[in-house]
Image: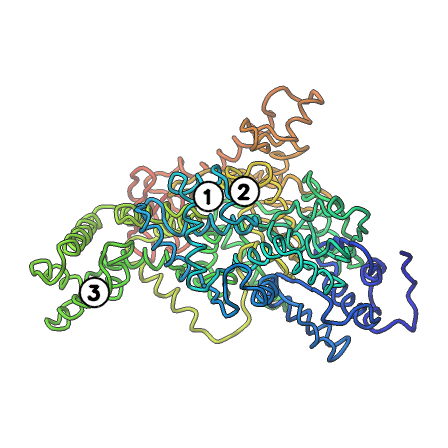
Amino acid sequence: MTVPAPSPNDPAYLQGLNPPQREAVLTTEGPILVLAGAGTGKTAALTARLAHLVATRRAWPSEILAVTFTNRAAREMRARVGKMIGDAVEGMPWLGTFHAIAAKMLRRHAELVGLQSNFTILDTDDQLRLLKQLVQAEGIDEKRWPARQLAGLIDQWKNKGLIPEDVGAGESEGYANGKGQKLYAAYQARLRAVNACDFGDLLLHVLTILKRHRDVLEQYQERFKYIMVDEYQDTNSSQYLWLRLLAQTRKNICCVGDDDQSIYSWRGAEVANILRFEKDFPGATIIRLEQNYRSTPHILGAASGVIAENGNRLGKTLWTDIDVGEKVRVVGIWDGPEEARRVGEEIEAVERRGGSYDDVAILVRAQHQTREFEDRFIQIGLPYRIVGGFRFYERAEIRDALAYLRLVNQPADDLAFERIVNMPKRGLGDKAVEKLHRLARAEGIPLALAAARILDTDEMTPQARRSLGNFIGDLARWRDRAATLPHAELARQILDESGYTAMLQAERSTESAGRLENLSELARAMEEYETLGAFLEHVSLVMDNEAQAETAKVTIMTIHAAKGLEFDTVFLAGWEEGIFPSQRALDEGGLNSLEEERRLAYVAITRARRLCTILHAANRRIYGQWTSSIPSRFVGELPPEHVEAESSMSGGASLWRANWSENTDPFANVQRGDGRGPGWQRAQSSGQFSREPVRIVEARTAAISIGNKGRSDMSVGLRVFHQKFGYGMVAEIEGNKLEIDFETAGRKRVMDSFVSVA
């Protein structure tokens, strides 16, 4: 249709919209896909469209289905539309999240899937409890095949729209040697027996009803004259199929989304849903929102240059009227601790220039990367908040590990004992712990000593005594080792020998993998402290920090959690191969995962309004060992005209560009497994080289030499500097450990990587 030109007589909801936004509002009939780039005002267009449909009497409020992904987005949409059309918004019962709308439908037709209308929606804990019962009844070893793993599989199947009979043998092999499908069926039967469903069932049951009961489907197809969907790129297969069924008659469906911001495949999102919209709805109108109201041209240019490397995308070009501003900075630094120091100094400079901490964010690829920033900010008194997760030392797995360490360091720590006496499970439940408490109170002794004494009684079952005896023996053995073993290595051994590491490995989930990374980061953090006691004291001070008044704070969060947010100043940390893109993601998902990681980079850059700084380190500690790093391939994809590179290392300012210039990335094609990606293939076909590019080898060698610099030139009598202890003189050298007489702190034993020649 031809969109009318703006007029002074336009209703208020049309005023201020740019031409593509007006088109998205006024094109009411037929299938429409609105490709809304980052910061292009898609919410304004979406709410104005809703207001237009009601204000022009094209539909009653109750005849519009408007779907969002979060309650916050639904509330915001309802509030905005209310300001435009007044009380009419209260008559929009079908404006809400996928789950909320599906629950409403399911309660109307619950009997069609064997439920009653007052069914209960189980939370995760109840779901796991029920699955554990089924796993035990089947005689399956729950330690080898955790119920949490089965819950993850069932969730995947429900996201795909698969009921138990749809799950094939290949899919079922993922759990207990092919018993996944049988347990899924038993789980669904048990849910029906107790008149309950989980969150995945809300959509799955409605989808089943619409497929099997034509009259119900036709009722909703007739009811919904218009369908609108926000964040369409995040839909899973079940949501996609549900929407397609509802839209098949009228085809008045408007989907708003951005294929370049599809970053939730691990939650079941299918980027293919938005990519095939035109195939699903032939003749669809495609509207591109490309005017960005958030970021500077350099930031948009940098983000566009990176995302252009993806092959599976619909394509759009962001632009802005905002002043040019500063180029995106790419900063090469020595290692992780320097990264935290550098960012802290720059944030303090922002505040001195009149900026607010609230307008600053640090975005990381994985949660374990927050630890060094937290420790540094505590040290310098810089206020911060962790968004989308717990502060590092407050995470459950970290608290568990610290409880083990506290108990080794201080046997009378009853709180630590109580936390981990049955973690992982040792068959020592609440009744056993209560007996220990009674004995400890009666004799005025710590729980650990009470546990040792109760072993000589018959107050516990033989199995409980055996488990408790093994635990007490482990504690004694670890306490003996603590006298001679480096405490970081002691922590690793405790986590392994206690079964804690194996417990997380057995879960085989994205969450458990992240928790294992956090534990590795904990061990790395311990290496910076001379004794276990000194480290635990540091942790206590960190934990106490949150008691400060509510003031402006720097935001630290993962890139995933930052989607939809924006900040004046953004620091993007850890842009190195293996960290970002994530090596685990590449190993598991191949080229598809690489493209999603690149979309994540696009999202990260476009969170910045005015200043964006990308940092990469030449050295990282991986599982306690210093490892040389090379910059992320995404760094090499940044257009030079939008980037300013610098480095704290001699000759390092140009290292990243030498490393990844001209798309000669030899590691890109993770699908083939030979490390030769599209860039390699283009270069080879043009005759540029017939083997691994020489400059890549040279750049990698340069990074390694930089990483080793300063380690081989240590000698007794050399004056050095340590960030915490200040200046001192090397007294003894043992491998990579130094005995140093510090001028103010006395003699300390430190790793050579933490000192520099004074």
**Residue 642 sits above or below residue 378 on the image:** above
Its colouring scheme is rainbow
Q: Seen in the image, is 423 located left or right of residue 660?
A: left
> Which numbered tag is attached to residue 503?
none
The amino acid sitting under disc 2 is Glu
What is the C-alpha distance between the residues marked 3 and 1?
A: 42 Å
What is the C-alpha distance between the residues marked 2 and 3?
A: 47 Å
**Residue 418 sits above or below residue 754 on the image:** below
> Which numbered tag is attached to residue 576?
2
The amino acid sitting under disc 1 is Arg
Q: Secondary structure at mark 2?
A: loop
Identify the residue position indicated by label 1 in the image.
Answer: 620
Say which residue appears at 69% left-offset and 72% top-offset: 92
The amino acid sitting under disc 3 is Val
- Residue nearest the observer in this picture, 739 or 318: 318
**Residue 470 sits above or below residue 108 on the image:** above
Is disc 3 in contact with disc 1, using a CB cutoff of under 8 Å?
no
Q: State the image quarter where residue 710 is shown.
A: top left
